Image: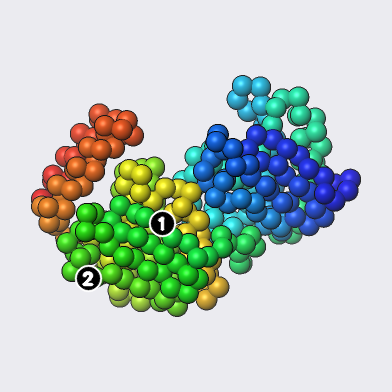
Amino acid sequence: MSRMGDVLAGFHAAWEFDSDSVLIRYERGIRTPKLFQALGERRIPLAALSGVTLTPGRRGTVVLRAEPRPGADPLTEAAAGQLKENCDPYRLVLPLERETLAEYYADELRARLPQADDGPAERFLVPAPEVPLQFKAYDGKASFDGRTVHFRWFWTGASSAKWKAGDQSFAVSELSGVEWRSPEVFEGHLRLLRRDADGQAGRPAQADQDPAAVVFGLGYGPVHESLPFAAAVLAAVRERGPVAAVAVAATGPRRDPADIAERIRHLGELHQAGLVTDEEFSVKKAELLAEL
């Protein structure tokens, strides 16, 4: 860049360019995605980027996007490609009249990216969200203090299997990774993966039956709360060693009829809210009934 401290302001965010990083400050306006508001600001080292693109946007806009290297950012690693386009923290949407200026900064950024470091990062280069963190899921409250994850179950949402297991605490040293499925899809959840391979293989297939997982629901476990939480846990785990690959069991034990009824009720709420189509509702309801 021509000088450090140059700022490029767009919709919902402004990028401040430094010699070795980009500081992204997100707005807190009512139209700003809640995830951006929760993140506040993020300093992205240039070493964490693999490229920069500038593409046409919608309705007279252009989109400047920094492409993070795989393994460099705990937030994008935890999201695993599930974020909607408008919630991508690496996108800066600008009015079309700023295209020339955006193109200038895109070229400057490309010229400064470390050419030898465009492969997967060996460690996280972008700071994780700060702890302590907590959020309310559908079946319990999750909290993380930097060392231990706690799940406290709600009697209104937790399955009988979780009530029998009791409230749970997991030290970071016990974990090998985190599985986050967006709350914007049916059966979203946050699942903690154990370092114990035997325990991992024997876990319940359904997150609502797994004491090492909390499930999301309509209004519970929103992206802007649960994703930073997952990213912080993942970063803490990564500091202690490699993160295990996510393994999803193909089948599991038959469910309790009461749990099936509760899941169907929840599915009905999503259907009434317009988050699930008629066809999706019918198909998923049939799948749940088939598990009885």
In the displayed structure, does residue 255 sit left or right of residue 152?
left
Residue beneath disc 1: 135
Alpha carbon separation for disc pair 1 and 2: 21 Å
Residue beneath disc 2: 165
Q: Nearer the viewer, residue 138 or 202?
A: 138
Q: Residue at x 31, y 71 (%)?
A: 168
In the displayed structure, does residue 279 sit left or right of residue 88?
left
Seen in the picture, residue 281 relative to 109 is either above or below; the reply is above
Q: Position of residue 135 (x, y in %)?
A: 41, 56
In front: mark 1 or mark 2? Answer: 1
Locate residue 100: give its quadrant: top right
Q: Position of residue 119 (x, y in %)?
A: 64, 58
Q: Tell me which amino acid carries mark 2.
A: Ala
Residue furthest out toward the top: 59
Q: Nearer the viewer, residue 74 or 49?
A: 74
Q: Tell me which amino acid carries mark 1.
A: Phe
Q: Residue at x 53, y 65 (%)?
A: 131
Q: Residue at x 61, y 21 (%)?
A: 59
Q: Is residue 190 visible?
A: yes
Seen in the picture, residue 33 relative to 182 is either above or below; the reply is above
